[in-house]
């Protein structure tokens, strides 16, 4: 039984890695590395969670994490803008949720996330991708979201560790 579990885990890990690489190598997302995004590892410090490849970049003062959630949407890249976390009311959350929904934007634990499909063909050039990401930032700025203060973590990436 342990060998079977090891085999299934290895198979799943290989599939996840392949899906992430494919998403990040699909044009125009492959151009991100040429425009200031660097490959990094998420959960690198965790002892209980496997590391995942992500892209990390900056856009208009916001640190952006680009990741592929292979368990729920392997053909979608999630661009998360890390923001200052401020308490907001349930009424405000509902208002933001309804406003953001039409833009494929969601409130997230460490910021605000924009989802972009690699398969639907709406983003066919780097210019469209860049415009979409800039519009994302303008929308969240219009709602008074601010970039995460890097002084709080000495300019380092958050560890994402769940330990």
Image (cartoon, grey):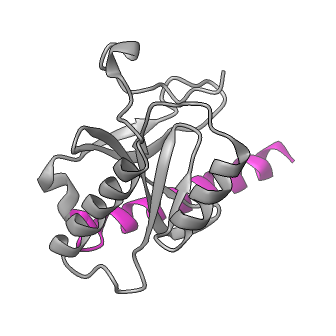
Quarter the C terminus occupies? top right
- The residue located at (57%, 56%) in the rendering is 96
Q: Judge whether 123 appears above or below 70 on screen.
A: below
Residue located farthest toward the right when viewing the structure as drawn? 1
Which region of the structure is painted magenta?
Answer: 1-30
Residue 14 visible here: no
Residue located farthest toward the left when viewing the structure as drawn? 34
- The residue located at (30%, 72%) in the rendering is 26
Residue 58 figure quarter: top left
Q: Position of residue 72 (x, y in %)?
A: 64, 64
The reply, left or right, for residue 102 in relation to residue 162 is left
Q: Is residue 11 magenta?
A: yes
Q: Nearer the viewer, residue 30 or 105?
A: 105
Q: Position of residue 141 (x, y in %)?
A: 35, 48
Q: Nearer the viewer, residue 115 or 52?
A: 115
Q: Position of residue 146 (x, y in %)?
A: 37, 36
Residue 135 figure quarter: bottom left
Residue 136 figure quarter: bottom left
- The residue located at (36%, 52%) in the rendering is 142
Q: Judge whether 57 appears above or below 136 on screen.
A: above
Q: Nearer the viewer, residue 105 or 45?
A: 105
Q: Position of residue 52 (x, y in %)?
A: 48, 44
């Amino acid at each position: 039984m342990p060998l079977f579990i090891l085999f299934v885990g290895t198979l799943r890990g290989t599939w996840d890695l392949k899906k992430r690489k494919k998403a990040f190598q699909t044009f125009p997302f492959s151009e991100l590395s040429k425009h200031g995004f660097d490959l990094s590892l998420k959960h690198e410090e965790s002892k209980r969670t496997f590391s995942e490849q992500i892209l990390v970049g900056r856009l208009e003062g916001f640190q952006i994490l680009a990741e592929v959630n292979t368990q729920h949407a392997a053909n979608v890249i999630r661009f998360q803008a890390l923001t200052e976390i401020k308490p907001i009311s349930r009424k405000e959350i509902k208002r933001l949720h309804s406003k953001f929904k039409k833009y494929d934007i969601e409130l997230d634990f460490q910021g605000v996330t924009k989802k972009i499909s690699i398969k639907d063909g709406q983003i066919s050039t780097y210019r469209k991708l860049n415009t979409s990401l800039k519009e994302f930032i303008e929308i969240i700025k219009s709602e008074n979201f601010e970039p995460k203060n890097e002084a709080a973590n000495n300019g380092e990436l958050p560890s994402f560790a769940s330990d």
